[in-house]
Image: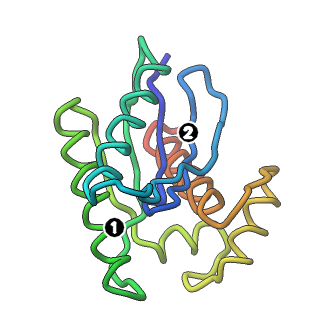
Amino acid sequence: MTGAILALDLGIATGWAMRTPDGRIVSGTASFKPHRFEGGGMRYLRLRRWLTELKAITDPEGIEAIYFEEVRRHAGVDAAHAYGGFLATLTAWCEHHQIAYAGVPVGTIKKHATGKGNADKAAMITAVMARGYLPTDDNEADALALLGWALALSAEATGG
């Protein structure tokens, strides 16, 4: 049996999808929106705690690898700063727990899911639904699409 594979669409509303060690696919959206009277770093501490909880529920196999959507352009400065903080928190957490991680360009994920590297949110949701999933929003859809890409890559690498 292998460990879990986790796919993340990092952001204040983080989409996530995981192939569990027993082969099930689970997904959702985790909110890291700042709470009232909370310091700016608390969202990153909550991300770290959430990752630790995911790791705990996958034991004893644990998390084998984490793939995240690698964003190179943001609509605004606040989004760019938040993404940078989430990315730094994620990669430091992975290093600490010796978990492999890799960023996957947005266009690569979209092309794998829809055939178009510049697909819009609606096309991504439609593509994921065509594979039998019911995402609650575009963040979860992106994470499911990324997980699909990662599992295809894994199957290709193992000849399966």
Q: Is residue 51 above or below residue 107?
A: above
Q: Say what amino acid the circle numbered 2 marks.
A: Met
Task: Point out which mark residue 102 bears.
Answer: none
Q: Nearer the viewer, residue 58 or 109?
A: 58
First along the sequence among labels 1 and 2: 2
Q: Position of residue 131 (x, y in %)?
A: 78, 54
SS under mark 2: strand
Q: Position of residue 74 (x, y in %)?
A: 38, 83
Quarter of the view holding residue 25: top right
**How many other residues sit within 10 Å of disc 2, few (<14), some (14-19) or many (≥20)?**
many
Residue holding disc 1 = 83
Residues under labels 1 and 2: Cα distance? 20 Å
Name the residue at 58% across, 67% down: 112
Q: Say what amino acid the circle numbered 1 marks.
A: Tyr
Residue furthest to the front in view is: 37
Q: Is residue 32 above or below residue 56?
A: below
SS under mark 1: helix
Residue holding disc 2 = 18
Quarter of the view holding residue 81: bottom left
- Viewport quadrant of the C terminus: top right
Q: Nearer the viewer, mark 1 or mark 2?
A: 1
Name the residue at 42% across, 16% down: 61
Q: Position of residue 110 (x, y in %)?
A: 57, 73
**How many other residues sit within 10 Å of disc 1, few (<14), some (14-19) or many (≥20)?**
some
Q: Is residue 51 above or below residue 62?
A: below
